[in-house]
Amino acid sequence: MSAAESANAIQRNQVDLLDFIDWSGVECLNQSSSHSLSNALKQGYREDEGLNLESDADEQLLIYIPFTQVIKLHSIVVMGSEEDGPKTVKLFANREHMGFSNVSDFPPSDTAVLSPDNLKGKPVVLKYVKFQNVRSLTIFIEDNQSGSEITKVQKIALYGSTVETTDMKGLKKIEDH
């Protein structure tokens, strides 16, 4: 797949949602302390192929990403190697406080099984109807390509658009005369 084809998979009106992530609330369960989520999610770090997010105790990772405003999620890019890159990725819109103990209690908004093309950067286009008013996204990486103990994620990028909302705090109350 050429770079032009890859770019075409992300529609023109979809933007990288990096600027709309509420970094103070971002969490990742089972991440290696020396290979944390920021390596795969933050601008600059995620472009460095030498930096990875790695799982710690086993192959699973549970990532919680809140947004500063309501977004529509169109597609996701999850990059990694063909050996220890993620395989089954479950996405949950607006599900807070999930843990490994209850992640299987809820049906995912969408599930992707990543192909070698996806791991090289081909976007996974999501069930758009399920991701229309997203305040937070939980990403559950269930397993990896080879079934090994450690999953490595080189890059996570989210593409979509913001939902135009009215800033209620910015409105002035009209006084009765």
Image: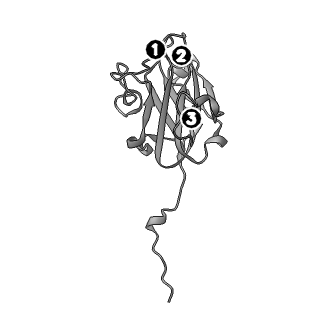
**How has the structure been colored for display?**
one colour
Residue under the image location 43 percent in, 22 percent down: 154
Residue under the image location 61 percent in, 46 percent down: 132
How far apart marks 1 and 3 lie (CA) works out to 25 Å
- On the image, the x and y values in percent for residue 116 come to 55, 16
The vertical placement of 129 against 45, above or below, is: below
Q: Residues within 10 Å of mark 1 (few under 14, many from 20)?
A: many
Which of the 4 image quarters holds residue 31? top left
Residue under the image location 55 percent in, 18 percent down: 143
Callout 3, which amino acid? Ser
Q: Which mark is residue 62?
A: none
How far apart marks 2 and 1 lie (CA) works out to 8 Å
Query: 58 or 133, which lies in front?
Result: 58
Query: 63 or 145, which lies in front?
Result: 63
Q: Which mark is residue 144?
A: 2
- On the image, the x and y values in percent for residue 50 come to 35, 18
Q: Residues within 10 Å of mark 2 (few under 14, many from 20)?
A: many
The vertical placement of 27 against 174, above or below, is: above
The residue pinned by badge 1 equals 150
Q: Look at the numbered discs 2 and 1 and tell me whether their residues touch, using CB distance below 8 Å.
A: yes
Which of the 4 image quarters holds residue 73? top right
Q: Which mark is residue 75?
A: 3
Q: Mark 3 or 2 closer to N-term?
A: 3
Query: 176 or 158, which lies in front?
Result: 176
Query: 153 or 157, which lies in front?
Result: 153
Q: Is residue 131 visible?
A: yes
Q: Mark 1 or 3 closer to N-term?
A: 3
Q: Mark 2 or 1 closer to N-term?
A: 2
Secondary structure under tag 3 reads strand
- On the image, the x and y values in percent for residue 131 come to 61, 42
- Describe residue 147's horizontal placement relative to residue 129 as left or right: left
Callout 1, which amino acid? Ile
